[in-house]
């Protein structure tokens, strides 16, 4: 079983920065893609950023140029650097990974989420 735990959320003023971390643990053979998603009250969950196992990235249109996704495969860690935060970035942020738990067995795992609130 694989578990993801997010950290780094909190309250920040508009224009500020936060760095989210995602720690993967458990029966990990190899992490595949890792991504960050967010869900604001009354809205659907949306993609924020994704990085595949080769390092290719994609971002949601609303965060391009402000957010940066990264990962440390040796530590089974993922990160989301968020700069120039806006009130509309307020949401619960979820980490997700597709992880090989054996050579040929792939699992989809979500973290529990961390709250990010952007407000003055």
Image: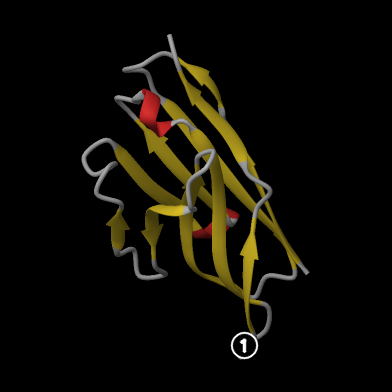
Instruction: Answer with the quarter of the image where residue 15 lies.
Output: top left
Q: Please indicate whether residue 88 sits to the left or right of residue 12 in the image.
A: left
Q: Is residue 7 visible?
A: no
In the foreground, 118 or 75: 118
Instruction: Measuring from the top left, give residue 16's x and y in whole percent.
Output: 37, 18
In the foreground, 103 or 18: 18
Instruction: Measuring from the top left, give residue 104's x and y in whole percent.
Output: 61, 91
Which residue was labeled with disc 1? Answer: 103
Q: Report the residue at 78% width, 69% height from top.
A: 1
Instruction: Measuring from the top left, give residue 38's x and y in whole percent.
Output: 49, 46
Kindly state the secondary structure of the residue where label 1 is placed: loop
In the foreground, 57 or 74: 57
Q: Residue furthest top?
A: 120
Circle 1 Cα neighbour tier, 10 Å, few/some/many (<14 / 14–19 / ≥20): few
Q: Residue furthest left?
A: 65
Q: Please indicate whether residue 69 sits to the left or right of residue 110 in the image.
A: left
Instruction: Measuring from the top left, give residue 21's x and y in whole percent.
Output: 55, 41
Q: Report the residue at 55% width, 52% height from top.
A: 95
């Amino acid at each position: 079983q694989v578990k993801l735990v997010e950290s780094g959320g909190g309250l920040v003023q508009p224009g500020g920065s936060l760095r989210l971390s995602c720690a993967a643990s458990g029966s990990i053979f190899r992490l595949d893609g890792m991504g960050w998603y967010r869900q604001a009250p009354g809205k659907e969950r949306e993609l924020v950023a994704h990085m595949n196992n080769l390092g290719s990235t994609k971002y949601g249109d609303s965060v391009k140029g402000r957010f940066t996704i990264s990962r440390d495969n040796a530590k089974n860690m993922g990160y989301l650097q968020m700069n120039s935060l806006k009130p509309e970035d307020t949401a619960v942020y979820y980490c997700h990974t597709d992880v090989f738990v054996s050579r040929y067995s792939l699992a989809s795992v979500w973290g529990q989420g961390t709250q990010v609130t952007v407000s003055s």
